[in-house]
Amino acid sequence: MNKAESQTIANLFDGAGYRAIRSPGNADIIVLNTCVVRQSAEDKINGELGLLHEVKRNHPQAHLLVTGCFVDADTAALKKRYPHVDLFFGPGDTETLLQWATEKDDIGCLSRDDLAAYREGSPLHAYVPIIQGCNNFCSYCIVPYRRGRERSRQIPDIVREVESLVGSGTRDVTLLGQNVNSYGHDLDSGISLVHLLEELNEIDGLSRIRFLTNHPKDMEDRLIEAMSRLNKVCEHVSLPFQAGDDDILKAMRRGYTGGQYLRLVEKIRASIPDIALATDVIVGFPGETAQQFDRTMDILKTVRFDTVHVAIYSPRQGTLAAKEYPDIVPADEKKARLVAIEKLQEEVVSAINARLVGTAVEVLVEGNKKGKWYGRTRTDKLVFFRDAADWQGKTVMVKVTRAGAWSLQGDVSLPEN
């Protein structure tokens, strides 16, 4: 999400005739986009703002703008604390940025026409934010306090953006939200993520649709059914479970039990047998015992995820967990638990990928590196292959010949006559 919002800001200034440079010391406009999901990140931002204060002293005509989750609702307090910052605006709040620019004679015209999605690595793929904020208030998370309550974009606006992206070469879009599967609940007429997926599925030239991140409590049956029915929606879903123990999940305020999560996975796999599942896990939440951690390992062993993102808990000032739960799990124990999950996951994904050897997978080719074409499957697996033909931007069937934990190798699989 932060990368997508950074690109949106960059596109606005590009459209007004600016060009990006490497050194803030020589910039006319400096934009600091911030992530404060961890306390260490916020500490780093404070340090960065100190360095940029010196830049402003040496270059007083430069404009310093700060956005992202560091910016809370009390911008007056931030301005008092950091008087060298010209503008604080919340994450995704381009309206405030546009309004500020119109009041500055030396900025130039920033146009809404220059708003665009974020493309990562390849022009084939783009990230499209569809909902901002979060209503869940998990006890460890600062995001709702910084990004606010959930606010969905209107379907016609999203469709126009994706159509524009497809017109300039995008084939694969990922829809973004802190809680993406609650999209639409704040809109009229019972709009949901299903309705948006159905609209996007009809766009000519678009090949693949993904969405993240999903909350298990909002993964409705109709969304699972739509994923199985809509041909452009990929067999790939991110579904964080965070912890396996019910008491820890309750303290986290996640709104489900480990058993409910496992039943949800069963339901998804019954509807979409080839689904690739990704998840997030937090280790060392306050008070988590060795036995409670074992329940997290049990879920990992039972579900066998394709991707696991694991993080060590650290107190986040301003969250419920930081106020109410002492951080008593030793740092070396947290690290050992993280290493245990990483070791298990490498074994699991190696076995999952090994089953693909000898099968043909559909690859959307993103580029060529060191003589090998590379791209991703619908299940988001990285595939490399050699071939003399030009496959850039095309879809090709590749027969998998070798599989590792992090990528697949193969040969072009041509249809038989």
Image (spheres, helix red, strand yellow):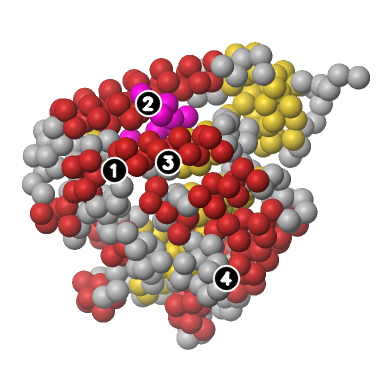
For disc 3, the marked residue is 264
Is 203 one of the magenta-colored residues?
Answer: no
Q: Residue 273 location in percent, x, y?
A: 57, 31
- Tell me which corner region of the image, top left, top right, bottom left or bottom right, holds residue 157: bottom right
In the image, which residues are magenta?
301-310
Residue type beneath disc 3:
Leu
Vertical relation: 377 (above or below) 223: above
The answer for how far apart the CA atoms under marks 1 and 3 are is: 11 Å
Q: Residue 312 location in percent, x, y?
A: 25, 38
The answer for how far apart the CA atoms under marks 2 and 1 are is: 15 Å
- Left or right of residue 360: residue 222: left
Compare residues 167 and 60 and report the one nearer the observer: 167
Per the image, label 1 sits on a secondary structure element best described as loop
Are the two marked residues, 3 and 4, in contact with CB atoms closer than 8 angstroms?
no
For disc 1, the marked residue is 257
Residue type beneath disc 2:
Thr
Report the residue at 20% width, 42% height from top.
248
Mark identifier at residue 302: 2
For disc 4, the marked residue is 154
Per the image, label 3 sits on a secondary structure element best described as helix
The answer for how far apart the CA atoms under marks 4 and 2 are is: 39 Å
Mark identifier at residue 77: none
Task: Count residues near mark 4 (Cα–Cα under 10 Å), then give few for <14, some for 14-19, many for 20+.
Answer: some
Vertical relation: 208 (above or below) 146: above
